[in-house]
Image: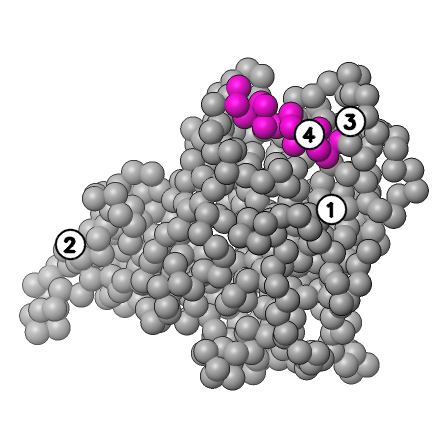
Amino acid sequence: MFDYKQPYVLNPDAPADRLDAKRPPVDNGLEVVDPARYYSREFMDKEWKHLWPRIWLLAGVTADIPEAGDYFRFDHGHESIIVVRQEDGGIKAFFNVCSHRGNPIALNEHGSVAKFTCPFHAWKFCIDGKLDCITDEQSFHPQLVAHRPGLTEVRCDTIGGLIFVNLDGKAPKLSDWIGLPPGYLENYEIDKMHVVRHMRTEWLANWKTGADAFYETYHLPHIHPQTQGVMEDYSQYDLYPNGFSRMIVPICTKSHRVDDQDTVDAGLQYMMMEAGMDPAEFTGTARDVRKAVQQAKRERAKRLGLTHYDKFTDSQLTDSWATGIFPNTQMGLHPEGVFIMRFVPHPTDPERFYYDNITMVRYVPDPNYSVPGWMGLPKDTDVTGATRPPVESHGAGQRADLGEVLNQDVDLVEAVQHGIRSRGFRGPIWSEQEMRLRHYHREIDRYLNGEK
Ligand code: FES
Ligand SMILES: [Fe+2]
């Protein structure tokens, strides 16, 4: 069923131009990479020189800054960026650095301002980055401030409700750099969703050790055996240009490892109820549940006037389309909402990263609709979008409760980091179920080797 020559294909009948079609194979070689990339300072420095400044980084979402003056801060390694909505509806980004002596001008994660005021000596900046006023300007030699030093702009562009920044300003156009076909992200209408939860935790591992663990479902039966009743662990893995990739993880189905493929037990009943179905009325077997849930969701969307569901394939209605935005972001895409995970490098330590977990939902104001329970939101979560929740931050060693499955991943990733460090480890041996890992590591190497 999963052969290295013929990787698993979920729907062999999908036409080649449809988004669920299996992508053609990519030859990324068979190199076993040097594990030093997961812990050495040299490798981290190379990433800072040749990778991070040159690519587009997912900074945030348009839904977080609906009005002029709304801003958020995006920190990546030692850089901090402010992204702010303009008077004309556009979006600009600036280094979060005062042009006077370098103090950060925005200390909050989110906010809304008429002008930015630096906390150090109160220089003021307009939301378009221009210098507004210098405190005690008469005390500066006019020659020093004649150029009216404003904020340094960062190149910024959006696609499908996602905001990206490029630090060196020289990356190809965002639409050319995004390796995903048109519509892939846009169909979800993420610009009409809003953030309902934002957690940030510090993990004791390299950011790539973190990303690797979320780029395959090979580990599911072993680390997360509780998922077997509702989820297949043979995913369809697809590789896109520029280091992008996705896996389609079939949900509302049992893992092929489960002997009893007939009984509709509690897990599948739950998934049916979350789609508005009554399991007591269901006459099929466990094998029929995924299709039935897809139909139920389509019908419900019609009733609710959610016309964008017409653009989704059946698979998108039930399955997780876990999509890798090169190199350090993965989005779990669902019509009801999306999960954004960023593996953000630590400013100085190659064996730490910040795991940023953002949950967005599409609010549907209908008494017969509720945000699905499998999205894992706490009971009192405001899903209406009336308020943007603050970032829940947890430092290393402070164990945040990320939910059962993610808690298992934290322990795993930190243990793997430890093992990678051993002189007995010779480098990762990647299967075809781990083709996404090879694909994005190979792309990183292209940047680092000067091939890009
Ligand atoms: S550093 Fe910003 S006003 Fe002095
Ligand atoms: Fe996991």
Residue stretch in magenta: 289-303
Marks 3 and 2, the one that precedes in the sequence? 2
Could you tell me which secondary element the residue under label 3 belongs to? helix
Residue 418 vs 214, above or below: the answer is below
Label 1 CB less than 8 angstroms from ligand 2: yes
Give how far across and how far down residue 254 sits, in percent. 81, 40
Residue 390 vs 240, above or below: the answer is above
Q: Which residue is mark 3?
A: 269
Left or right, residue 257 beside residue 214: right
Check whether the beta carbons of the residues at disc 4 and disc 3 lie within 8 A of each other. no
* Marks 3, 1: nearer the viewer: 3
Q: Nearer the viewer, residue 290 or 206?
A: 290
Kindly report the secondary structure that dominates the magenta region of the rendered protein: helix
Circle 4 residues within 10 Å: few <14, some 14–19, many ≥20? many
**Quarter holding residue 377:** top right
- At x 33%, y 58%, the residue is 156
